Image (cartoon, rainbow, N blue to C red):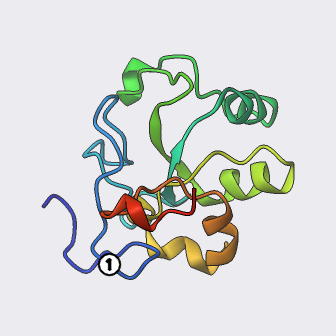
Amino acid sequence: MNGPVSERNVLGEELEPCGTEPMTGFLRDGCCHTGGDDRVMHTICAVVSAEFLVHQASIGNDLTTPRPEFRFPGLVPGDRWCVTAHNWARAHDDGAAAPVVLASTNESVLRLIPIEVLRQHAVDVPADPSALDL
């Protein structure tokens, strides 16, 4: 494991990786860890949508243009990415929230965003899919 053992997800379990294609996380280790130099909390594992990407660009957060100096490839709809809690919350308030992977979202976001709000946008697939209401 690349991060501190104590980091948990919003479900109270061990924080799971968010994505490696492209490699995400403030530390570019695939996880939405917090702490250190990450002052803006890249802690929500989002599956970015076209609507979310347009919204982020409209608030000055261009997530589609590659920035090699930050090891940032530029995102396309469907990519999993550790986004900042504040920018995700702003997108939610503006009706453009991206889906969230709860198992890979750091519990630290609960100081800003209630679990009920995150659950409304959850895209996690349970270990037993028969539990889903279809």
From this view, report whether residue 68 is shown above or below residue 2.
above
From this view, report whether residue 79 is shown above or below residue 36.
above
State the residue at coordinates (21%, 71%): 4
- The image quadrant where one finds the C terminus is bottom right
Residue 107: x and y in percent read 46, 75
Residue 51: x and y in percent read 74, 31
**Mark 1: amino acid:** Glu
User: Would residue 15 be seen by someone viewing this image from the given angle?
Assistant: yes
Label 1 secondary element: loop
Provide the residue designation for mark 1: 13
Splitting the image into 4 quarters, where does residue 109 fall? Answer: bottom right
Residue 61: x and y in percent read 68, 34
State the residue at coordinates (41%, 21%): 73
State the residue at coordinates (64%, 45%): 98
- The image quadrant where one finds the N terminus is bottom left
From this view, report whether residue 60 is shown above or below residue 121.
above
